C-alpha cells in the first residue's frame, strides 16, 4: 500500500466534503487515516499459510474443538463502514490440531479486507478445513453492521448471523447440533 498516495487521497476527500486539511485538528489526519487503512486492510498483504506458521500439531484425537466469542472487526465492502461481532469456530480434528491462537489469527486475516459477512464466514471455515485437513468445520458469526446502524434503515439493535459448515458438520446433523449447542452454552 502506498501510504503517501493514500494520504493525498484523504486530503482530497477532506476538501471535497468541505473541510480544510490545513487547519490544526486535521494537519496529521491524512497520515493517521492512511496508517489506519494500512492496518485495517492488512489481510490483502498476508497469506493464511504465514498466519498458521507451522502451528499444526499431531494429536491422536478426533474430538470436537471449539473456540467461542472470538472478537472480529471488519469493513463492509459496500459502504466501507465497520462491522463487528463474535466468531465461533469448531472443528473435528483428523490427527492434527492447530494452535488455538491461530484460529483467531485466521479470522482476523480474512476480516482485515473489505468484506461481506457471508464470504468472511466461508473463508474462515475453508482456511481451517484446509490447514488441518479436518473431518469437519463449523463457523458461526454474529455481527453488528454500522452501515445498517448509522445510515439507511438505522436499526441499532440488529445483529446478522451467518454460518458455514463443511465436512461432517454439513453432512451429519448430530455433529452440527453438538457444535451449535457448545457455542450457545453459557460459561459459569
Image: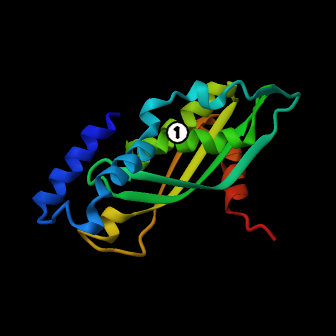
Residue 126 placement (x, y as % from top left): 55, 32
Q: Which of 62 and 155 is in front in this view?
A: 155
- SS label for mark 1: helix
Label 1 sits on residue: 109
Q: In this view, does 15 lie to the left or right of 24?
A: left
Q: In this view, does 178 lie to the left or right of 166?
A: right
The answer to whether residue 96 of the structure is visible from this angle is yes
Q: Residue furthest right?
A: 60
Q: Is residue 33 above or below residue 175?
A: below
Residue displayed at 70% across by 50% down: 67
Residue 9 placement (x, y as % from top left): 20, 46
Q: Which of 37 and 86 is in front in this view?
A: 37
Q: In this view, does 50 lie to the left or right of 149?
A: right
Residue 163 placement (x, y as % from top left): 52, 48
Label 1 CA crowd tier, 10 Å (few <14, some 14–19, many 20+): many
Numbered marks: total: 1
Residue displayed at 63% across by 45% down: 104
Which of the 4 quarters of the picture holds residue 50?
A: top right
Q: Which of 64 and 97 is in front in this view?
A: 97
Residue 188 placement (x, y as % from top left): 81, 71
Residue displayed at 35% across by 34% down: 1
Q: Is residue 181 above or below residue 129?
A: below
The answer to whether residue 116 of the structure is visible from this angle is no
Q: Is residue 99 above or below residue 39?
A: above
Q: Is residue 42 left or right of residue 67?
A: left
Residue displayed at 45% across by 45% down: 39
Which of the 4 quarters of the picture holds residue 134?
A: top right
Q: Which of 110 and 40 is in front in this view?
A: 40
Amino acid at each position: 500500500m502506498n501510504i503517501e498516495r493514500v494520504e493525498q487521497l484523504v486530503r482530497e476527500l477532506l476538501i471535497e466534503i468541505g473541510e480544510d486539511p490545513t487547519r490544526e485538528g486535521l494537519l496529521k489526519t491524512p497520515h493517521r487515516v492512511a496508517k489506519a487503512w494500512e492496518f485495517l486492510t492488512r489481510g490483502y498483504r498476508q497469506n493464511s499459510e504465514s498466519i498458521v506458521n507451522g502451528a499444526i500439531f499431531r494429536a491422536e484425537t478426533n474430538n470436537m474443538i471449539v473456540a467461542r466469542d472470538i472478537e472480529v472487526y471488519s469493513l463492509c465492502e459496500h459502504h466501507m463502514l465497520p462491522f463487528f461481532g463474535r466468531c465461533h469456530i469448531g472443528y473435528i480434528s483428523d490427527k492434527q490440531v492447530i494452535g488455538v491462537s491461530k484460529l483467531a489469527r485466521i479470522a482476523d486475516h480474512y476480516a482485515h479486507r473489505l468484506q461481506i459477512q457471508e464470504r468472511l464466514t466461508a473463508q474462515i471455515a475453508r482456511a481451517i478445513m484446509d490447514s488441518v485437513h479436518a473431518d469437519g468445520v463449523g463457523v458461526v458469526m454474529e455481527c453488528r453492521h454500522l452501515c445498517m446502524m448509522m445510515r439507511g434503515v438505522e436499526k441499532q439493535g440488529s445483529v446478522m448471523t451467518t454460518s458455514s459448515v463443511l465436512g461432517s458438520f454439513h453432512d451429519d446433523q448430530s455433529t452440527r447440533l453438538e457444535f451449535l449447542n457448545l457455542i450457545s452454552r453459557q460459561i459459569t
